[in-house]
Image (cartoon, rainbow, N blue to C red):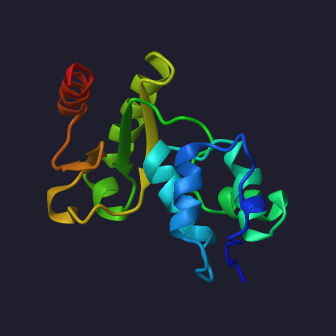
Amino acid sequence: MDTIRSDADAAPHDAHPLVRDILARHAGRPGALLPILHDVQDALGWIPEPAVPQIAAALQRSRAEVHGVISFYGHFRTTPPARTQLEVCRAESCQACGGNALYEHARARVAAGDPGEVSLAPVYCLGLCAQSPAVMIDGRPHARVTPEKLDALLAAAREA
């Protein structure tokens, strides 16, 4: 059971203050590991390596157990996110409407750009099947996306 210890040993002295606050909010809650990991990533944008022993100590778990959960779920990041998050739908409807070519265009565009500027991730349905192909940029969906439209959307994201 993932119940956080409430004693002073629960968080090391060199702990990240945001992580300490998150651990304090979840103190005494059973099954707290996933909510803690989500909260850390929401607060910091990623789960830094120094947070792992901090979380493990608070939950009385091994660092390997915490790392195992982080590495199991594709949602969790252990490196800082890129400035712009690009998700391209790879589901059947989008594939049927040119999604494969759009994905390859996006991949080439990301590879040619500055590291850390844009990240690319496949997703399997954005709920815009009637308006395929679809992408999500920084949490905002876009429909009927062509390579040219994608370039314009990414340029606008870069300017924002």
Is residue 50 visible to us here? yes
Indicate the quadrant containing the N terminus: top left, top right, bottom left or bottom right.
bottom right
Residue 18 percent coordinates (x, y): 52, 48
Percent coordinates x, y for residue 7 in the rendering:
73, 67
Left or right of 31, for residue 99: left
Q: Is residue 7 left or right of residue 94?
A: right
Residue 42 drawn above or below residue 30: above
Q: Is residue 76 visible?
A: no
The quadrant in which the C terminus is found is top left
So how many labels did they put on this image?
A: 0
The residue nearer to you, when weighing 116 against 49, is 49
Residue 1 vs residue 90, the one in the foreground: 1
Q: Quadrant of residue 72?
A: bottom right
Q: Residue at x 80, y 70 (%)?
A: 60
Q: Residue at x 18, y 25 (%)?
A: 156
Residue furthest to the front: 8
Residue drawn at the location 67% of the way across and 72% of the way down? 4
The residue under the point 22% across, 48% down is 140
* Horizontal arrangement in the rendering, residue 20 relative to residue 52 (left or right): left
Where in the figure is residue 54, as x and y percent of width and height? 72, 53
Q: Quick one: 131 or 36, which is closer to the camera?
A: 36
Q: Is residue 32 left or right of residue 114?
A: right
Residue 136 in the image: state x and y as whole percent: 28, 47
Along the line of sight, the residue nearer the viewer: 116 or 144: 116
